[in-house]
Amino acid sequence: MLEESKYKSQMKNLRKNYVRFPLDLKPEVLDGFKAACSANGTTPTTEIKKFIARYCAKYGRGVPGLTTDVEVELPANLARFATEQGIDLNDFLVDLLTEKLGSDGEKT
């Protein structure tokens, strides 16, 4: 009984604070994506949320409440190395924070 009540409370919170985003994919595409995510120790939902976070960080500048500019200081040699390796530091930081905190800032 307690478990059912907890589930109803969680669903009510989800419906109040989140929206659904249906996505039509061919079965083989979804199966391949699920397999690739599983092989990398992640989930399709996590990877889609990370993509959305990166995309918004890159293209959502100026949209109130969507992005925040931050200034980060790091050693010049690391910045140079990242550039040489083709690493987008913004994407890297968004990925790392999403992995550690979740896509909506809640620790996972």
Image (spheres, grey):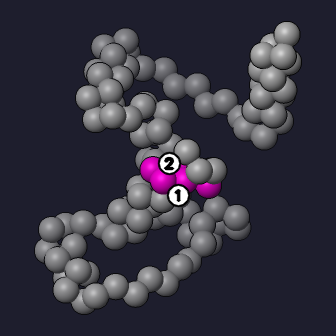
Say whether residue 74 is magenta. no
Closer to the camera, 6 or 37? 6
State the separation of the CA atoms marked 1 and 2. 6 Å
Q: Are marks 1 and 2 in contact (CB under 8 Å)?
A: yes
Closer to the camera, 94 or 2? 2
In the rendered image, the residue lying farthest to the front is 2
Residue 37 in percent (x, y) is at 33, 31
Residue 52: assigned label: 2
Mark 1 crowd level (few <14, some 14–19, many ≥20, 10 Å Cα): some
Secondary structure state at the residue bearing disc 2: helix
- 2 versus 14 height, above or below: above
The residue under label 1 is 56
Q: Does residue 62 appear to the left or right of 17 in the view shown?
A: left
Q: Does residue 77 appear to the left or right of 37 in the view shown?
A: left
Q: Does residue 15 appear to the left or right of 24 in the view shown?
A: right
Residue 81: assigned label: none
Mark 2 crowd level (few <14, some 14–19, many ≥20, 10 Å Cα): few
Highlighted magenta segment, given as a residue range = 98-105
Three-letter residue code for mark 2: Ile
- 1 versus 105 height, above or below: above
Three-letter residue code for mark 1: Cys
Q: Residue at x 65, y 66 (%)?
A: 63
Residue 25 in percent (x, y) is at 42, 20
In the rendered image, the residue lying farthest to the left is 84
Q: Quadrant of residue 66?
A: bottom right
